[in-house]
Image: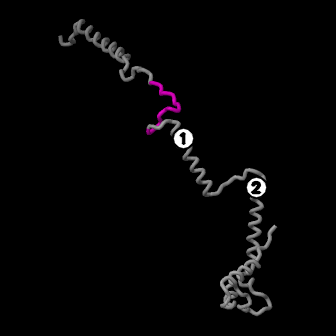
Amino acid sequence: MVGDQPVCPPQLLLRGWGAVLLSQCLSSVFSQIPDPELLPTDPPKKPDPVNSETVVFWGLRLWQVIGIFAVFVLAVVITLCCIFKCRIPRTKKEIEARHAQRQAAKKYANTLETVPPLNELTEIPGSTPDASAVQTVSEQVQTQSPNNSQLSVVRGSEEHTSTLSLPETE
């Protein structure tokens, strides 16, 4: 019995094959059982529709938030318009009037550049500079006699002021 190999009884062989088949069946069955985490759940609840009474944040409703935002934007626009003076003319007359005003301002500025200094304007060419040539009201009052009453001084100053007249403009 030297060359004889031990022989397994057929029952043991059937049990081995049965165990292999059973493990194959169980593995295929277990692979078909879904994971409880992956099982379908109830669909998520749809959010409430957004309307004007929806609370957005800090307990403020949507219409309140929109109103606060609109007031803020309006305040910024008004502030910028006041600072930068960005006015939009509304009519053709206003546009033309503004253009004429700018042209007049330019002409006036150019005229001011050609005006001589004040000390040159007060000198009379060809005459000797005499400080007493122009007599002021206070000098006139001092030259009057001291025995005149206060009333005559007032009348004299009224006469001098009445002789002055404003240039008429058309």
Magenta span dominant secondary structure: loop
| Rendered position, 13 above or below 132 | above
Q: Which residues are magenta?
A: 45-58
> Does residue 57 show up magenta in the picture?
yes
Q: Vertically, is 33 above or below 89?
A: above
At x 75%, y 72%, the residue is: 110
Applied colour scheme? one colour
**CA separation in Å, label 1 and label 2:** 35 Å
Q: What residue is shown with label 2?
A: 95
Q: In the image shown, does 149 or 128 lie closer to the viewer? A: 149
Q: Is residue 84 left or right of residue 101?
A: left
Picture quadrant where residue 104 is located = bottom right
Q: Which of 43/88 is in front? A: 88
Horizontal side of residue 119 vs 26, given as left or right: right
The residue at the far left in this view is 1
Q: Is residue 18 left or right of residue 103?
A: left
Residue with the mark numbered 1: 67
Q: Amino acid at mark 1?
A: Gly
